[in-house]
Amino acid sequence: MQESSVQSPQTKHWLVRSLIVTVGVYGALLLMITAIQRKLLFFPSHHTQTHALMPWKNGEEVIGFVRQRPAPKAIWLMMHGNAGQAADRVYAMPSFPAEDTVYLLEYPGYGQRKGSPSRTAFDQAAIEAYKLLRSTYPKHPICVVGESIGSGAASFLAAQSPPPDKITLVVPYDRLADVAARRLPFLPVRWLLRDDWDNIASLRDYRGPIEIFAAQRDEVIPFEHAQNLAKHLPRATFRPIAGYHNDWSWGAKVRFSAP
């Protein structure tokens, strides 16, 4: 005699309750991720050490730091990664031409700069800094470097008029949402992410030189994302480098050059 496949009322009740609990837990997770996502994306520090770099001011506000040279051939503007602050990027100085002046942008909410981190805040700060350098150095090439998350703000400047004379990206991504989706495949991050940069779209119409340095063992932004970015930008120079996400400046693996 075959057993009945009809579920008992108790089983149906248990299944409904389990479904409700699962949906509730998942919904709570989505709400939590939405509420704290900027804390998961931005990791500012706020110490006062400058590591021998000079403050860079716009009026009375310190907007970053500078390594000044008396007769630079080119001016560089660097947007750093999502952790620490601008003054920490003294380690990147050997990657720049020794004769050039380098400005390190500080993001709102980082270091001693007021504000809160967000894509809008980063992009607006980048525009402000870029326009200031254009007015200060009207006869010099202005080159832009973006490190990690800073590659988004750096690429965003491609739409400025005039555009940067060169854009260099170090351990970058193609689309930030794609990186997040890879990390959290069980969440609809493309729908949840409020601070998304699409470097492919930002650079698609840029006609200046682009150089991309990608760490082959990058554990933060997998190598394939930089590779995909270069694939969509056939004019870009793609340079794989050995090592991980945070050691790109070690051992002179990366050397920036003005156009």
Image: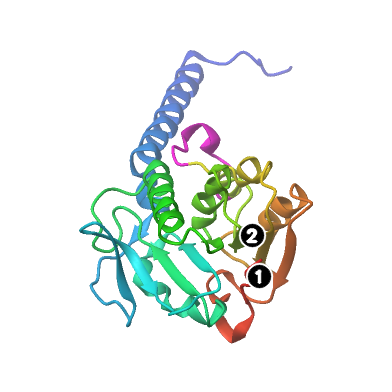
The residue tagged with tag 2: helix, strand or loop? loop
Is 36 displayed left or right of 250 in the figure? left
Chain part drawn in magenta: 183-195
Outermost residue, left side? 60
For mark 1, what is the residue?
217
The answer to which image quadrant residue 177 occupies is top right
Outermost residue, bottom side? 251
Decide whether the magenta segment is chiefly helix, strand or loop: loop
Choose between 39 and 4: the one closer to the eye: 39
The residue tagged with tag 1: helix, strand or loop? loop
How much space separates mark 2 and mark 1, taking CA atoms? 7 Å
For mark 2, what is the residue?
222
Does the magenta run of residues contain 179?
no
Is 65 displayed left or right of 161 in the figure? left
Colour mapping: rainbow
**Label 1 crowd bin: few (<14), some (14–19), many (20+), radius 10 Å:** some
In the image, residue 31 above or below residue 247 = above
